Amino acid sequence: MNAPHLPVLLDEVVEALAIAPGDVVVDGTFGAGGYARAFLAAGAKVTAFDRDPTAARFAADLPAESFTLVCARFSEMDDVLGEGGADGVALDLGVSSMQLDEADRGFSFMRDGPLDMRMSDQGETAADLVNTAEPEDLARILFVYGEEKKSRRIAGAIARRRVQQPFTRTGELADFIEGVLGGRRGAKAHPATRSFQALRIAVNDELAELEAGLVAAERVLKPGGRLAVVTFHSLEDRIVKAFLSERAGRTPGGSRHLPQQEDPRRPSFELAFNGARTAGQVELDANPRARSAKLRAAVRTEAPVWKVAA
């Protein structure tokens, strides 16, 4: 089956992983298989993860001798491969194009559907969250995960409305938020964009999953193994940047007025390049989704895995 969307920063990710024939590479979010197919073409043996059970339909034509799809979160990669079990790890974060395009999944207000937003088929839906969360909790979610400055106004209005009529549809919620905020007023983005991002992140616990996935990648990579992470919004990118900076020994600490204490832990990563790479104009013209994408990459050192506080 042909992939229904274009993988973002594909050439840059393949280059960052520096795949050699026979390498074991983790595709952290299989999606429609765009990355996995490129890794296989480079001669890798690919273990892909995706918590969305519907992703399996895009793997039917892939070779069983060199490809395995695991229906699980990518944070579980070390449970499957073990410590030092991979030469490369690629994490493509966020929601996939086909999830956005399928109205029944409820990710996008561009196609009216049930207010679901779950990447898997388990757990509470966005409707559950919108209709039951305390107003202050809902406001916090919208502010922290969506960076929505008018989160309290939106949460309060939702709480008052849901008493009379619970929210069940994406279009219904988007129209309501637009009304609360007074329409677009010349803005390019829909007024509900930030709120929908926040609800999706909360429903799928995406930021905690990212943090756990980075730690799992550190554990699963061999010395010399390479990590490539593609993010799509500032919250994700901050987490990846902070993790790699810390693990590479580049995080400043302490006061300039006090003696600096050397971190006894040896750097477990070296940055593959400084900063983040973004899509070029040719890719942007072909795939607008790449506009917000950033790639960060690092190489695993021989240092032990850092202990994570419980």
Image (cartoon, grey):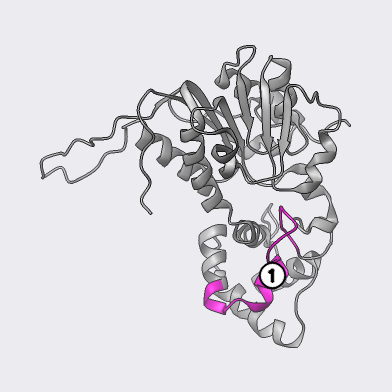
Query: Going by the picture, which residue comes out furthest to the right?
Result: 1
Residue 43 position, x and y percent, is 69, 14
Residue 245 position, x and y percent, is 38, 35
Residue at image point 69% right, 72% down:
128
162 above or below 34? below
The front one of 238 and 63 is 63
The front one of 158 and 250 is 250
Residue at image point 68% right, 62% down:
192
Q: Split into 4 quadrants, where in the image is the C terminus?
A: bottom left
Q: Residue 10 lies in what quarter of the image?
A: top right
Q: In this view, does 212 lie to the left or right of 163?
A: left
> For the magenta stretch, what is the residue range?
116-137
242 above or below 110? above
Residue at image point 66% right, 85% down:
160
Q: Residue 112 lies in what quarter of the image?
A: bottom right
Residue 132 position, x and y percent, is 65, 78
128 above or below 288? below
Mark 1: few/some/many CA within 10 Å (<14, 14-19, 20+): many
- Is residue 134 part of the magenta span, yes or no? yes
Q: In this view, does 24 lie to the left or right of 287?
A: left
Q: Residue at label 1?
A: 177
Residue at image point 46% right, 45% down:
239
Q: Split into 4 quadrants, where in the image is the N terminus?
A: top right
The front one of 138 and 161 is 138
- Is residue 204 part of the magenta span, yes or no? no
For the question of whether residue 234 can be seen, the reply is no
Q: Which amino acid does label 1 sit on?
A: Ile
